[in-house]
Image: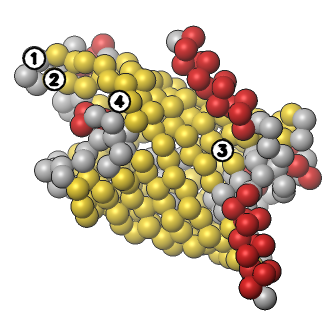
Amino acid sequence: MVKRLGVILFLLYSTSGHTADEGGDLSANEVSRQLSNPNTSLARLTFKNQFRWFEGSLGDADGQRGYELLFQPSFPIKLGGGDMFFVRPAFPVFFDQPVFDSSEGRFTQELGLGDIGFDISYGHTTESGVNFSVGAAGSLPTATSSELGIGQMTLGPEFLIAKVSKKYVIGFFPNHQWDVAGWGEENISITTLQPIAVYLPGNAWSIASSPIATYNWNTETWTTPINLAVSKTVILGDTPWRFGMEFNYYTERPDEFGPQWMVGINVVPVVENVFARWFQRSTDQAH
């Protein structure tokens, strides 16, 4: 556990030296509101520490636990007129991922990088605060072991619609992915549904519920959580940080093995948007 926390603190320390170009001029309450906006222009580094408890019909499934560090950087690019371009990767690192060994009839613990997820989208925000975006979501077969990935590249469409005000955010964010390349033998056809509900009571706090439900069309199984997240944004030096806790209870999961509980500790520094600055410089030079 000490080594895990050391890795996390080192990663956080290495990013905190960057000064946020937009977030540094805003109050903590305004940063909190903008970070709750799905189409926010703020660049950020999201670190999600997720602790899971599992259950299922496999032998000793109810005694399994896991820890995952999910790193999600985001550097949006403003295109003008309320339009945005997003490229958002997600790097999952598993420290204690339980994997069932069917040949030995027992679980083993795996350590390594999983399949890197991503989404690429074009977004627009209207003057009334309605957000739209459309794009593609997928994953790359980057897992360091076959037990931590599916050996397939996946790809499919995604869509977002949301209403943003000073006190709340309400939205819906679905996508669907199929396998399109790779060496894995499993056919992939998965739909993800994410309703978004955020309440902003003020003083840089946010209370949210954004459960990520998935349906596997090949196995005809749902994985569905009840989700609650509470976050607080503060300004440390010149850098805004959001700290939060997140809880999932899974009401639906595969019968053989799946998550029952998830407790998350989320840390999000707002950083300088180097890609947007480079894009703006290239655009100015072109004109």
- Front-most of residues 140 and 39: 140
Q: From the image, tell me which residue sits under label 1.
A: 104
Q: Which mark is residue 101?
A: 2
Side of 109 where 164 appears, left or right: right
The amino acid type found where label 1 is placed reads Glu
The answer to whether residue 228 of the structure is visible from this angle is: no
Vertical position of residue 158 compared to residue 57: above or below: below
Tag 3: Cα neighbours inside 10 Å, few (<14), some, or many (≥20)? some
Side of 166 where 255 appears, left or right: left
- Front-most of residues 37 and 150: 150
The answer to whether residue 122 of the structure is visible from this angle is: yes
- Front-most of residues 213 and 15: 15
- Front-most of residues 128 and 232: 232
Vertical position of residue 13 compared to residue 142: above or below: above
Side of 219 where 112 appears, left or right: right
Q: From the image, tell me which residue sits under label 3.
A: 45
Percent x, y of residue 260: 37, 27
Q: Which of marks 3 and 2 is nearer the N terminus?
A: 3
* Distance of label 1 from label 2 (alpha carbons): 6 Å
Q: Earlier in the sequence, mark 2 or mark 4?
A: 2
Q: Which mark is residue 259?
A: 4
Percent x, y of residue 61: 24, 19
**Given contact means CB atoms under 8 Å apart, are the residues at marks 1 and 2 in contact?**
yes
Residue name at image x 43 percent, y 61 percent: 137
